[in-house]
Image (cartoon, rainbow, N blue to C red):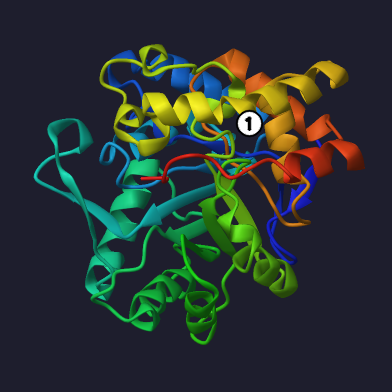
């Protein structure tokens, strides 16, 4: 796989990364298969997919443990390992009806990094990210605690997730921002207006999560019946029947371009994301070897100017994100 850098001054990574959330969290929890997921992570490294992204809240905690298991035995040194802090559950995990709560208190960040390192089986992460900003804590205070992890050698770089340009600037006043992670796909294009251009101008890596529209842009989800019974996506507005029907036009356009290139819809959707900037590294999630190889292949697909113009002109999706 071709490589790029994590921002203007970061380490080399494969042009496409791997998001590990769905291996233990949110999507199809009854279909969890840790052995297969471990094999997928190891296969990713073989394919050159070297940015591996997880978070303490996924599970919670089980995702970091899984990633740590997969990278044991020498693979840890071959990847850029990223995790996150700042979200916790109140009242049980997602499957138990728990509610996500933001926690940006410095004392929490300080203990959370140590717990993440234990679960991951490493003495440092390459990228430590603030999952969400806590409205009750000034971002400067939370960011200062993440910066302490860099000073202590527990994190090489620190990043933000789902933030505004003003929030990035406020964090930058304390410590350099290495990356910004936000949702970006053909059905979520909000960051293209301000956040992504700012990141490009500052040499900050931009890491799109859900670059395949939570799987919708692959063309494999025509109705909620195509989702497992306990899949979190069933609760989202864009996966309700009326919205799914309206949004099929997006999939149809992607599929038409894919047919002309002899590619898959997923590869076209990812190639569009990759074309949005120099430092854009999408992190599609999968726990299936076939889909991992499919996603990795997007790094070798170059869309024409006509393809990009057609995709850029697609209408906004029906339904809110959450």
Identity of the residue drawn at 66% across and 68% down? 199
Is residue 163 something one can see in this rendering?
Answer: yes
Residue 230 horizontal side relative to residue 19, left or right: left
Q: Which image quadrant for residue 272? A: top right
The image shows residue 270, relative to residue 227, as above or below, that is below
Give 94 or 106, whichever is nearer the viewer.
Answer: 94
Quarter occupied by the N terminus = top right
Q: Which image quadrant for residue 98? A: top left
Residue 157 spot, x, y in % from top left: 55, 65
Identity of the residue drawn at 39% across and 57% down? 131
Identity of the residue drawn at 61% across and 13% down? 290
The image shows residue 55, relative to residue 107, as above or below, that is above
Residue 229 horizontal side relative to residue 286, left or right: left
Give the structural element (helix, strand or loop) at label 1.
helix
The outermost residue toward the left is 91
> Label 1, on which residue?
250
Q: Which image quadrant for residue 9? A: bottom right
Residue 294 spot, x, y in % from top left: 68, 20
Residues packed near mark 1 inside 10 Å, few (<14), some (14 to 19) or many (20 plus): some
Residue 303 spot, x, y in % from top left: 86, 36
The image shows residue 45, relative to residue 86, as above or below, that is above
Residue 193 spot, x, y in % from top left: 64, 64
Is residue 47 something one can see in this rendering?
Answer: no
Residue 68 horizontal side relative to residue 81, left or right: left
Give 196 or 73, whichever is nearer the viewer.
Answer: 196
- Give the total number of marks visible in the rendering: 1
The outermost residue toward the bottom is 173
Give 42 or 317, whichever is nearer the viewer.
Answer: 317
Quarter occupied by the C terminus = top left
């Amino acid at each position: 796989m071709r490589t790029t850098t994590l921002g203007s001054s970061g380490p080399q990574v494969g042009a496409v990364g791997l998001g590990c959330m769905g291996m233990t969290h949110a999507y199809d929890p009854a279909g969890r298969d840790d052995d297969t997921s471990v094999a997928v992570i190891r296969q990713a490294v073989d394919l050159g997919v070297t940015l591996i992204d997880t978070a303490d809240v996924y599970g919670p905690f089980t995702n970091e443990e899984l990633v740590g298991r997969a990278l044991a035995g020498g693979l840890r040194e071959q990847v850029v390992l990223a995790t996150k802090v700042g979200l916790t559950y109140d009242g049980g995990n997602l499957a138990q009806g728990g509610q996500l709560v933001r926690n940006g208190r410095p004392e929490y960040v300080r203990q959370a990094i140590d717990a993440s390192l234990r679960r991951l089986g490493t003495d440092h992460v390459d990228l430590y990210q603030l999952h969400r900003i806590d409205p009750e804590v000034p971002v400067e205070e939370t960011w200062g605690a993440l910066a302490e992890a860099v000073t202590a050698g527990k994190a090489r770089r620190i990043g933000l997730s789902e933030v505004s340009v003003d929030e990035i600037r406020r964090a930058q006043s304390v410590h350099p921002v290495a990356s910004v992670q936000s949702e970006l796909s053909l059905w979520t294009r909000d960051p293209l207006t301000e956040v992504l251009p700012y990141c490009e101008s500052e040499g900050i890596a931009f890491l799109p999560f859900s670059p395949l529209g939570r799987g919708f842009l692959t063309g494999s989800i025509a109705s909620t019946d195509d989702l497992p019974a306990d899949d979190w996506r069933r609760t989202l507005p864009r996966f309700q029947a009326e919205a799914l029907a309206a949004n099929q036009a997006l999939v149809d356009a992607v599929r038409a371009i894919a047919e002309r290139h002899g590619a898959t819809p997923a590869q076209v959707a990812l190639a569009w994301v990759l074309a949005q900037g120099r430092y854009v590294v999408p992190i599609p999630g999968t726990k299936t070897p076939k889909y991992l190889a499919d996603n990795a292949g997007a790094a070798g697909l170059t869309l024409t100017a006509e393809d990009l113009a057609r995709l850029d002109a697609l209408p906004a999706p029906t339904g809110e994100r959450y």
